[in-house]
Amino acid sequence: MTGDEKLYQQYLAGDETAADELVARYGDTLTLYIHGFLGDLHEAEDLMIEAFALIFAKPRPVGKQGSFKGYLFRIGRNLAGRHRQKHRLRLLSLDELPFEPKGEVLAETPFYGKERKRQLYKAMEICRVM
């Protein structure tokens, strides 16, 4: 049994400081690991807390699953996967719109306006130099 598993067993026996030690050891790295899946640090922090809560809520056979760290990170990965699936953006087809978009309003209109201004200022700069 490694140090992590001993700390987990101590927590299960009622030692709250053992849980604090495990969170201190793996909280930040688990958050960054989950962040790699989600790209959202705040959600990753929430899921890190949820992963620890799942492990601490009731005794789990961590030793049979491998190391405590591996078990914790597997829970984090599963939570991240469920979160991504639940919050996946659904693409909207133009056929599903309840209205017809106006023809004169294009998505590119702001871009073209900015580009036209950029070219105008560049031309004015060239004329000023001559």
Image (tube, helix red, strand yellow):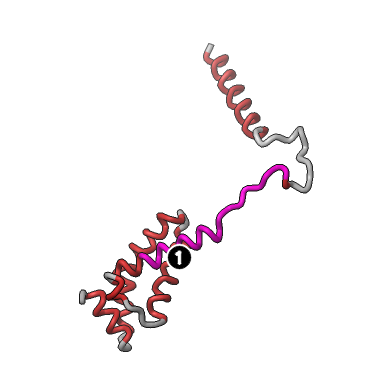
The extreme bottom residue here reads 14
Q: Is residue 86 magenta?
A: yes
Secondary structure mostly taken by the magenta-highlighted segment of the chain? helix
Is 113 situated above or below 83?
A: above
Give the residue drawn at x 52%, y 58%.
85
Give the residue drawn at x 76%, y 34%.
103
- x and y, in percent, of residue 29 in the image: 33, 62
Q: State left or right for residue 102 relative to residue 81.
A: right
Q: Is residue 96 magenta?
A: no
Q: Residues within 10 Å of mark 1 (few under 14, many from 20)?
A: some
> Tag 1's secondary structure?
helix
Quadrant of image for the N terminus: bottom left
Is 65 situated above or below 118?
A: below
Q: State left or right for residue 127 relative to residue 35.
A: right
Give the residue drawn at x 29%, y 75%.
64
Answer with the quarter of the image where residue 16 lies: bottom left
Q: State left or right for residue 45 relative to residue 29.
A: right
Q: State left or right for residue 69 relative to residue 44.
A: left
Give the labeled residue for mark 1: 79
Give the residue drawn at x 35%, y 79%.
60
- x and y, in percent, of residue 86 in the image: 55, 61
Q: How many marks?
A: 1
Answer with the quarter of the image where residue 48 lies: bottom left
Where does the magenta region start and end? 74-95
User: Given the image, on which type of amino acid does mark 1 rest?
Assistant: Leu
Is 46 situated above or below 87?
A: below
- x and y, in percent, of residue 127 in the image: 57, 14
